[in-house]
Structures are given as structure tokens and as C-alpha cells.
Amino acid sequence: MTGHDDIRIGTIIRAEGAAATVGYLLPHGFECFQISFGGHIGGLDLKRLAGEVREALARGGNSAVVSAIGIYGNPLVDEATRGDWPRLIAAADEFGCNVVTGFAGRIVDRPIPESLPRFREVFGPIATAAADHGVRLALENCDMGGDWQRGDWNIAHAPTAWEMLFDAVPNEALGLEWEPCHQMVSLIDPIPQLRRWVGRIHHIHGKDASIHWDVLRESGLRGGKTYVEHRTPGFGDTNWTDVISILRQGGFRGAIDIEGWHDPVYKDDLEMTGQVHALNYLKRCRGGEFVPNPPGYP
């Protein structure tokens, strides 16, 4: 693969059965895979899993890679999740990647500022270990149903919180796993936000949203009606051509991995139909098939 190596387009897969999933999906043109371990690694043998995934990628023969590995528990209160972050940092090279992703965690049902001392205590050493290994950490921007005052999982879901987190742990290895959907759920325009934060984004989730402004105008936020839905890219409101242009202008190098299993229409039997559509749509938004310049051009 050449020409579009700066921004690959892939999908998120589960660690369990990852090698088989890679083998099934490669013929559809996915260029990378983020491997998610859910809330805990558990008894999985990371070295063995990495070897199986590398073999599956090699059999595919199209230069696809592992883009990131992730753990999505609450490291501020869950000891097992907290211990899994260093394990993934140490194993990243086995998977051939340099990005580890997950939630920032949260002191449950307390305002975001009350989690900052614990965040500093937990992620200070984790960020140092990541920097020592040449690994970047990407905190997902999902609110997990929480807000500024209360929540169970994650404080890294709003720009004001990001500023506080990066002040608490001033390490450039620490950044964001960003997607427009989670901001649109909060009625934030993702485009100006992306321009502001592109330098701290280490990984992108390919998930969009549709905001039903007619419902908002009639019933408001608390009217008991669905006013926003998570969507697979290509079916939502975001202009991904703009997203990719801003990423390239900002010097981003990495991956957009489609986060499926959320779309209200392209689900169940249509899940992979929607994901492959999103893959091809995002490739078009990236500029289509790479065409090299003629000889002698700068």
C-alpha cells in the first residue's frame, strides 16, 4: 500500500477470534484493524494473539496492519483495567502498532474535577511508560451516558475536560481517540472542534450521527423522543471529506477505524453491508484511489 499510508481506513474487531475476523474481512479492502479487549484482557495470551493476527494479516497480502489496541474499563476504580494498560503498552510492538486506546475512567457519580487527582495518580506513570515504549495513548471521547456532574466510566468527553486532563498529565504521549458522533450527541459541531484539537488526536473512530433537528425544535432535549442517532459513516450528517482534509492539514498520521454495531438501520443482517459501504465511502472522502504524480513533478 502506498500513497494513503498517512490515513488508513479500517474497522474495530474483538480480541476474541481476532485472527479469524481479520481473515474474513481482508478481502473487502479493510486496511487496518483496531483490536478491542473490552473491559479486561483476562486470561488472553497477548503474545500468542499477536502472532495469530500477524499471520492472518500476512496471508491477506495487502499490507493491512493493526492500527491500535484498546481496553475499555474504568482504570480509576478497577484494578484489573488499570493493570491492563501497561500490559497493552508493553505488547503494542508485538501487534506492530504504537497506539493504545481506552477510557480515562471516572470516580463514579462525582463531578469531573473530583476525578482529576486520581487521574493524575493513575495516568502519570502510564503515560511515562508509554513514552518510554514509543507508544501513544488515546482516550476515547465517549460520555458513556455521563455528564459533567455524574457518570460511571469516562471523564474525557468534553473539551473543557480535555484541557484539565492534559494539564494534570502534561505528557505528549497522552492524546485523544476522537470521533464526531460523541460530540454531536452533545450538539457540538465537530468540525471547528477538530480544527482546534487535531494536534492531540492519536486515533479516530469512524462513527457518525444524525441529529433530528425537527424533533429538537418540537420536543427539546428532555421531551422523551429520540433526537440523535449513532450512524455508520456515509449515513450520518458529518462531512468526512472535511474531516480527512483537516486531519491531513494538521499533520495527523494514523487510522480511522469504523465503529460498527450502533446504526439503527444497518444492523443485524445488514451490519457488514453498512461497514463495507462506510469503508468505501471513507476511501472516497480520502480522495479515492491514489494516483502518483508524473515523473519530474515535485
Image (spheres, rainbow, N blue to C red):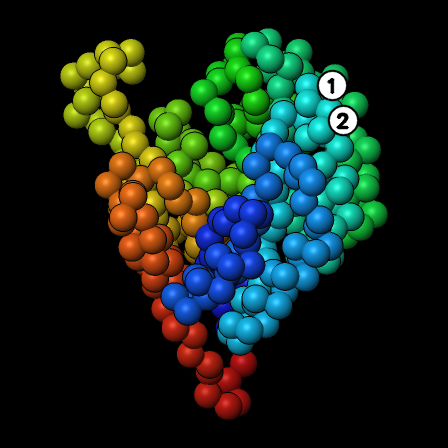
Examine the rendered structure and indicate whether residue 45 appears above or below residue 163: below
Residue 161: which numbered mark, if any? none
Q: Amino acid at mark 1?
A: Arg
Residue 283 visible from this viewpoint: yes
Which residue sits at x=63%, y=65%?
54
Disc 2 element:
helix
Which residue sits at x=29%, y=43%?
267
Disc 1 element:
helix
**Which quarter of the figure has residue 155?**
top right
Q: Amino acid at mark 2?
A: Val
Which residue sits at x=42%, y=39%?
180
Residue 118: which numbered mark, if any? 1
In the rendered view, does 241 fall on the left or right side of 120? left
| Badge 2: residue crowd in 10 Å (few <14, some 14–19, many ≥20) | some
| Badge 1: residue crowd in 10 Å (few <14, some 14–19, many ≥20) | some
Can you give x and y, in whole percent of width and height, for residue 57 in the image?
A: 57, 67
The C terminus: image quadrant: bottom right
**Which quarter of the figure has residue 88?**
top right
Which residue sits at x=36%, y=68%?
288
| Towards the viewer: 16 or 236 | 16
Residue under label 2: 122
